[in-house]
Image: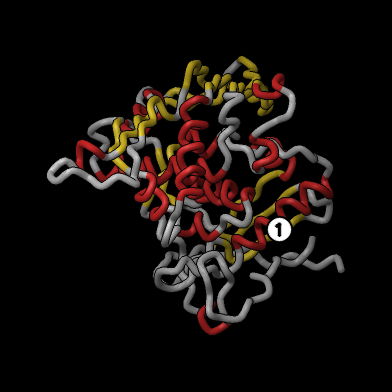
């Protein structure tokens, strides 16, 4: 086995959001705050494409796709798991940028106690939550298109939906939209005095997503940290998945083949999977500036077996975090 991968080369300061930090600041890195949340089915299923190119296929037939997710045995029956996505030819598939937009919308709903699926917001507010200090019309257009892609996506879950309210796993669910309604006001026009609330835009969460959030099926994520990971779509989705697993254990091992299927990677050869995940895992192991407070770091280290068929990650714990016993470092194969 190869030895654990180090955090990587540390870039000089001053750090910008998403940039590695100096060695001096790296020693005071903390875990991502994870004060925001991600609904569990979003983290477990490949609903977001990893590149803008894949968001808008050239062939219209590719706007409907089935993503196989393997077979599981539940009791005495075999369940073929899959996701079927129907995307709009006008707006395309939602990207990881749309995923971060959705997390910002969910956070606004959470702040109101999930009292309603309708969330009052603006493109400017969402842009600021995504880390844009002075957003302009191009960012506003990207946010609106992301919301429309989320609203127009029709999802069929086959043996992949978990219902927290009934505690039922491996469920089918049809007709799922992540957003039901998107309406933004023209932010170039000033508010009329006293009508700020009524004139703000409204985004309505999809019924199934809202019900799942109300039932408490979610885990913590750090939106600022996700913003800092925006240079790697795979790192963003890998963080959202792994942080759901980082509960009672500090060490986690997963099959690279399984992860490649889970994130719908095109290239599934062992060497291609290793190269793709190595870059993402290295980024998750680096202390990154989020533009607010100490740098944040998610992984302590990671390594693959000699055959590169499995990956083991060690979750980072800062000075305040509980520390579990670490395994003995694996031997190097050169």
Left or right: 55, with 210 as reference point: right
User: What residue occupies the far left of the structure in this picture?
Assistant: 194
Colour logic: secondary structure
Q: Please state which of residues 231 and 284 is positioned toward the viewer in this rendering.
A: 231
Q: Would you place residue 149 above or below residue 8 in this image?
A: above
Q: Taking 92 as reference, is 102 left or right?
A: left
Q: Where residue 89 sits in the image (x, y, percent)? A: 61, 24
Please tell me which residue is depicted at 78% across the width and 63% down the height of the picture: 2
Q: Looking at this rendering, what residue extends furthest in the front direction? A: 189
Q: Residue at x 47, y 66 (%)?
A: 290
Q: Which residue is mark 1?
A: 279
Q: In the orientation shown, which residue stands out farthest toward the right?
A: 334
The spot of residue 273 in percent (x, y) is 77, 47
Q: For the residue labelled by badge 1, is the local secondary structure a helix, a strand or a loop? A: helix
Comparing 231 with 238, the one in front is: 231
User: Dot 1: within a 10 Å radius of its alpha carbon, few (fewer than 14), some, or many (20 or more) residues?
Assistant: few
Residue 240, x across and y down, in percent: 52, 47
| Residue 199 horizontal/vertical position (percent) | 24, 38
Quarter of the C terminus within the rendering: bottom right
Q: Which residue lies at the image location 53% right of the left edge and 25% below the top edge?
A: 153
Relative to residue 273, is residue 146 drawn left or right? left
User: Up-down: is 310 above or below 177?
Assistant: below
């Amino acid at each position: 086995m190869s030895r654990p991968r180090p955090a990587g080369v540390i870039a000089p300061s001053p750090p910008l959001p998403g940039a590695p930090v100096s060695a001096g600041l790296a020693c005071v890195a903390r875990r991502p705050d994870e004060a925001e949340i991600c609904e569990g089915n979003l983290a477990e299923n490949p609903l977001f494409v990893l590149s803008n190119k894949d968001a808008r296929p050239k062939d219209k037939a590719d706007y409907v796709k089935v993503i196989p997710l393997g077979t599981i045995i539940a009791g005495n029956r075999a369940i073929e798991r899959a996701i079927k996505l129907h995307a709009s030819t006008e707006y395309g598939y939602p990207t990881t940028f749309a995923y971060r937009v959705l997390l910002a919308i969910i956070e606004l709903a959470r702040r109101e106690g999930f009292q309603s699926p309708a969330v009052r917001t603006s493109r400017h507010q969402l842009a600021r939550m995504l880390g844009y200090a002075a957003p302009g019309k191009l960012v506003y257009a990207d946010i609106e298109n992301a919301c429309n892609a989320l609203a127009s996506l029709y999802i069929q879950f086959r043996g992949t939906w978990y219902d927290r309210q009934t505690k039922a796993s491996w469920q089918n669910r049809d007709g799922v939209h992540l957003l039901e309604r998107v309406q933004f006001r023209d932010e170039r026009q000033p508010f009329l005095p006293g009508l700020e609330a009524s004139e703000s835009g409204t985004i309505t969460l999809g019924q199934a997503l809202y019900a799942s959030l109300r039932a408490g099926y979610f885990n913590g994520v750090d939106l600022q940290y996700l913003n800092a990971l925006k240079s790697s779509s795979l790192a963003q989705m890998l963080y959202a998945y792994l942080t759901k697993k980082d509960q009672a254990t500090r060490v986690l091992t997963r099959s690279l083949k399984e992860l490649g299927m889970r994130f719908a990677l095109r290239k599934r050869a062992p060497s291609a999977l290793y190269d793709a995940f190595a870059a993402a895992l290295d980024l998750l192991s680096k202390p990154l500036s989020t533009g607010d407070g100490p740098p944040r770091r998610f992984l302590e280290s990671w390594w693959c077996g000699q055959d590169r068929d499995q990956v083991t990650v060690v979750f980072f714990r800062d000075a305040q975090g509980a520390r579990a016993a670490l395994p003995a470092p694996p031997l190097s194969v050169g």
